[in-house]
């Protein structure tokens, strides 16, 4: 049968229409028909479908009978209990080639066994129509994933790497589910630190001629200017004045600010490019013009109060209020996030807004989410849309159990980290003789794919809320586990593999190629009986058995090579 490969977005749009939904959903559809017939008076009861608790009873079960019975009993129904309700649900199921058989268990659970032919047919259809027809259906059209979001002029650190990796995966899964995803980089490109940076820039480059090289490492530049700021009162004064000029829109200051941002941006872009992550920047500065209006809306709702010269929103159950206008009249992280939320809900019409940061910021998100609920921007029901979610992740720790840092106690630079991952992978490939086998491009490409892939995988495999210990050796460990031959079939296959050398020797000595053919034939037979007796993937012995498979492949490939036959990997 023909296999359609889905590449272009136009084809994906077409696939959208025959998107069949999840298996559970398809089963629910069949049960929905039955429920409408069985209890017409309860027209808004939705099917409750779950995988069967006991696999020997079936694949999925419908759990509606008990709760339905509770609803209808005493209301003039003919049913005598939950079990008859379940039986009626089963009886009233429409004919469907999906279901092979049904049975009733306990107080009216309806077990469904799916038809073998239907399962086969459905898989085969996916091969023709593409995996996009298997995309789940989510109840949102548009979502925003706010992730990565480093701070301009400061180094992007491993925390931002986690945000980038986790956020990208969430975005990819939502995109696969046909949600329109806005991938937002909420960079820290506004705030008081820019006064200091700009003033320092003017001091270093009075002519206004700045280039990337001249600023060099932005982080060092940041540190130097901070030092100047902390130690020189006169400079500090000028820096504070510079913030006013910048925020007032002074051309010269704006230009300097834009220059600094651009240099940072180029740095981040390198990391994103390596990771294959795409983001669209809408930094804090973007929302600045929306802050006064947003605060007015909140003020109208009576949410904003005066406290010790600042303007705050009190949040029930929190000791400290959410400050939205600082004592000096300036806006802050919270006022920016409130304005951004308003913009995302009203201008961008997002139904689900997801923020990916370290768990340390949880309080901040809880507080402004609560404020938005009080303002009526978000429903108070946690599960209703539009919805905001904070995706918090744990710290990245070093071997010492402390925050991950390099020897110089600086946070590890991302670019260095990715370089290292790639370098180590490349070295391992070279050691395995791949430099001779592959083109330099292949070597490079594989080292990147495996190196960056290992960094991503090591992060994503952990539950995101736990801290995780950063360990290159573990991350890039392609060293195999131990090979143990416990079962008879494993031992037989193992022994046969060992006999490879003597067979080749005999075949040479006797000048009899058929000996090698025989060996190869036996090898495939022994492999087949191993494979049918011993589960590989998902078994407790997985690593060991994968090794045995790999060893078989290596020997088989060599046999093919010696026989002058080209092995094919697809047929
Ligand atoms: N720039 C912040 C940081 O580095 C993260 C921003 C997260 N997004 C947001 N809308 N607050 O910690």
Image (tube, grey):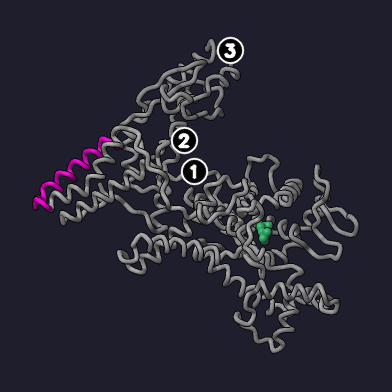
Question: Residue at position x 58%, y 55% from top?
Answer: 162
Mark 1 Cα shell of 10 Å, populated few (<14), some (14-19), many (≥20):
some
Which disc, if any, is residue 76?
A: 3
Q: What is the C-alpha distance between the residues marked 3 and 2?
A: 32 Å
Asked whether 505 or 22 is in front, the reply is: 505
Residue 297: which quarter of the image?
A: bottom right
Question: Residue at position x 28%, y 41% from top?
Answer: 494
From the image, give the main secondary structure of the stretch colored magenta: helix
Asked if marks 1 and 2 touch (Cβ < 8 Å), the reply is yes
Marks 3 and 1, the one that precedes in the sequence: 3
Residue 15: x and y, percent? 40, 49
User: Taking 541 as reference, is 99 above or below it?
Assistant: above
Marks 1 and 2, the one that precedes in the sequence: 2
Instruction: State the SS at label 2.
Output: helix
Is residue 50 magenta-colored? no
Instruction: Examine the rendering and report whether any part of residue 278 can be seen.
Output: yes
Residue 226: x and y, percent? 75, 72
In screen coordinates, is 101 left or right of 279? left
The residue at which mark 2 appears reads as 25
* Magenta range: 509-531
Which disc, if any, is residue 137?
A: 1
- Find ligand 1 in the image and state its quadrant: bottom right
Residue 483: x and y, percent? 37, 42
In screen coordinates, is 224 left or right of 210? right
User: Taking 231 as reference, is 79 above or below it?
Assistant: above
Residue 412: x and y, percent? 61, 63
Instruction: State the SS at label 1.
Output: loop
Q: What is the C-alpha distance between the residues marked 1 and 2?
A: 9 Å
Is residue 530 magenta-colored? yes
């Amino acid at each position: 049968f023909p296999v359609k490969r889905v590449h272009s977005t136009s084809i994906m749009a077409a696939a959208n229409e025959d998107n069949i939904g999840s298996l559970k959903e398809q089963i629910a559809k069949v049960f929905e028909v039955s429920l409408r017939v069985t209890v017409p008076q309860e027209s808004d009861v939705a099917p409750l479908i779950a995988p069967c608790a006991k696999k020997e009873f079936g694949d999925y079960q419908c759990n509606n009978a008990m709760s339905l019975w509770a609803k209808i009993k005493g209301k003039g129904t003919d049913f005598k209990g939950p079990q008859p309700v379940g039986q009626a649900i089963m009886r009233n199921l429409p004919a469907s080639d999906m279901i092979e058989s049904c049975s009733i268990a306990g107080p009216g659970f309806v077990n469904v066994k799916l038809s073998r032919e239907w399962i086969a047919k459905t898989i085969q259809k996916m091969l023709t129509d593409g995996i996009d027809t298997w995309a789940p259906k989510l109840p949102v059209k548009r979502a925003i994933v706010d992730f990565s979001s480093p701070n301009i002029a400061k180094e992007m650190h491993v925390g931002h790497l986690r945000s980038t990796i986790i956020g990208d995966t969430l975005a990819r899964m939502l995109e696969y589910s046909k949600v329109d995803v806005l991938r937002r980089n909420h960079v820290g490109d506004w705030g008081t630190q820019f006064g200091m940076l700009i003033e320092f820039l003017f001091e270093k480059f009075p002519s206004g001629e700045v280039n990337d090289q001249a600023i060099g490492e932005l982080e060092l530049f940041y540190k130097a200017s901070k030092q100047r700021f902390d130690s020189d009162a006169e400079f500090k004064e000028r820096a504070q004045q510079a913030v006013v000029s910048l925020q007032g829109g002074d051309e010269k200051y704006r230009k300097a600010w834009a220059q600094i941002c651009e240099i940072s941006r180029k740095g981040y872009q390198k990391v994103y490019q390596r990771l294959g992550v795409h983001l669209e920047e809408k930094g804090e500065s973007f929302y600045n013009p929306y802050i006064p209006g947003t605060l007015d809306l909140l003020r109208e709702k009576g949410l904003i109060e005066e406290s010790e010269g600042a303007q705050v929103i009190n949040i029930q159950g929190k000791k400290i209020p959410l400050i939205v206008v600082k004592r000096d009249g300036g806006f802050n992280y919270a006022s920016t996030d409130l304005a951004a939320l308003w913009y995302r809900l009203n201008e961008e019409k997002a139904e689900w807004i997801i923020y990916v940061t370290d768990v340390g910021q949880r309080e901040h998100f809880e507080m402004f989410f609560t404020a938005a609920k009080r303002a009526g921007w978000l429903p108070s029901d946690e599960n209703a849309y539009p919805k905001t979610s904070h995706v918090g992740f744990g710290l990245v720790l070093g071997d010492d159990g402390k925050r991950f840092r390099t020897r110089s106690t600086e946070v590890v630079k991302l670019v260095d980290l990715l370089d290292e991952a790639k370098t180590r992978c490349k070295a391992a490939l070279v050691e395995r003789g791949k430099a001779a086998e592959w083109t330099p491009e292949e070597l490079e490409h594989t080292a990147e794919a495996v190196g960056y892939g290992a960094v991503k995988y090591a992060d994503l495999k952990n539950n995101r809320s736990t801290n995780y210990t950063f360990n290159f050796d573990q991350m890039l460990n392609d060293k195999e586990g131990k090979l143990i031959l416990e079962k008879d079939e494993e031992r037989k296959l193992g022994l046969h593999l060992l006999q490879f050398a003597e067979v080749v020797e005999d075949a040479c000595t006797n000048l009899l190629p058929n000996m090698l053919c025989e060996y190869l034939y036996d090898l495939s037979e022994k492999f087949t009986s191993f494979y049918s007796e011993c589960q590989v993937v998902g078994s407790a012995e997985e690593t060991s058995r994968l090794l045995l498979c790999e060893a078989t492949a290596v020997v088989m490939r060599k046999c093919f090579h010696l026989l002058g036959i080209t092995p094919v990997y697809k047929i």
